[in-house]
Amino acid sequence: MVNNMSRLRCQYGEDEFLYEVIYLPKNQRKIAIHIHPNGAVQVDAPEGAEQTDIRQAVNKRARWVMKHLTDIQERQREVLPRQYVSGEGHFYLGRRHMLKVSHAPKSVPEVKLFRGRLNVTTQDKSPDAVRRLLWNWYRAHAKTIFQRRLDLLGSQIPWVRKFPPEIRLLTMKRQWGSCSSGGSIILNPHLVKAPRDCVDYVVLHELCHLQEHNHSPEFYRLLTQLLPEWQSVKAKLDNMSEILLNQ
């Protein structure tokens, strides 16, 4: 569990970036740096770590951090705001589907996926109305898909079989998932837009946190045991994050 956190600044040449330090229990032996899909920089440090050691670790990898932040900024420039009009592409389980908006004043508003097209029937064709309908559809499907994958994957994991967790949905800007102190798995509904192997990676990641509440070597040992190729799957998800999180 997280004990404390602080926010610091790193100067690299003429550039700088902010990073958040999260102090974890002492079984977190090393200082680890993570860059979230939205460009937030997180540093996990052992409880009691000295500020000078943390700054030294961040400064040592500042070039690596800046390269990733630059790559994220470049990808974000290519992502245009959603218009929610016919012909626009929207993802579901890793596949892009064309949006078709049909105005039907007397029909019940609905969203259906049929032959690779997302058909939205609505009395109100305004972008806000279409967005709400589509988002409600995503959330409903996300709950079903996530529960199905949790049931399948969890059936193979001893600590999950013994205490099956509850799934909760929460829209997040910087995370695909998290694990609550009460043992609930919290997943971002946007994740349902990602390929199935990416969904499985996030679900397994959070299930490992039920056993290891940090990013210790033991945590990564468990994750690698359950999903040996997790690093390549994570990289794929990170590369798609700007598009998938785009509303």
Image (tube, grey):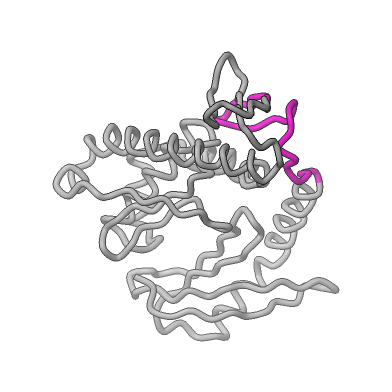
Place of residue 56 in the rendered image (x, y in percent of width and height, measured from the top left): 61, 78
In the depicted view, which residue is nearer to us: 27 or 202?
202
In the depicted view, which residue is nearer to us: 12 or 7?
7
Answer whether residue 79 is magenta in the image: yes
Place of residue 237 in the rendered image (x, y in percent of width and height, measured from the top left): 57, 41
Q: Is residue 105 above or below residue 69?
A: above
**Image quadrant where residue 120 sits:** top right
Number of numbered discs visible in the structure rendering? 0
Q: Is residue 60 left or right of residue 209?
A: right
Quadrant containing the N terminus is bottom left
**Image quadrant where residue 90 sits:** top right
Q: Is residue 199 left or right of residue 157?
A: right
Residue at x-position 53% and y-position 44%: 190
Residue at x-position 80% and y-position 43%: 78
Place of residue 159 in the rendered image (x, y in percent of width and height, measured from the top left): 19, 48
Farthest-out residue, front: 106
Answer whether residue 71 is magenta in the image: no
User: Which residues are drawn in magenta?
Assistant: 78-100
Q: Is residue 196 above or below residue 206?
A: above
Farthest-out residue, right: 14
